Amino acid sequence: MRFVEINVFGVYIAPMALMLIAAWLILIPLRRVASRYGLLRHVWHPALVVFSVYMIVLSSIVLLVANRGR
């Protein structure tokens, strides 16, 4: 699939920017669940784990969008 810019009120936005925001919005509830159950207390570097989960979510979104056109 070819990624094309999205026109939002006359401003062209890269599709990657929307995917970054979507991944961040998905990460917020995941981070709240992890902190509620104390999962982040059991890791060496909580910020690194949160960043890694963000990268996994973002990569999954990019792969899903790219494979949608197939």
Image (spheres, grey):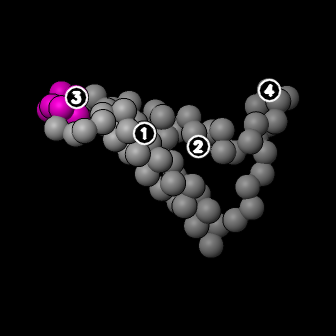
Mark closest to the chain's N terminus, 1 or 4:
4
Residue at image position (70%, 65%) is 1
Element type where label 2 sits in the image: helix
Mark closest to the chain's N terminus, 2 or 1:
2
Return the x and y of residue 59 as percentages of the image width and height. Answer: 51, 54
Q: Quick one: label 1, few (<14), some, or many (20+) residues within 10 Å? A: few
| Residue sitting nearer the eye, 7 or 51 | 51
Identify the residue position indicated by label 2 in the image: 19
Identify the residue position indicated by label 3 in the image: 35
Q: Left or right: 31 with respect to 26?
A: left
User: Can residue 68 be seen in the rendering of this structure?
Assistant: no
Mark pair 2, 4: CA separation: 18 Å
User: Can residue 10 be seen in the rendering of this structure?
Assistant: yes
The amino acid at mark 1 is Phe
Pointer 1 and pointer 4: residues touching (CB < 8 Å)? Answer: no
Residue at image position (43%, 51%) is 56
Q: Nearer the viewer, mark 2 or mark 4?
A: 2
Mark pair 1, 3: CA separation: 14 Å
Mark pair 1, 4: CA separation: 31 Å
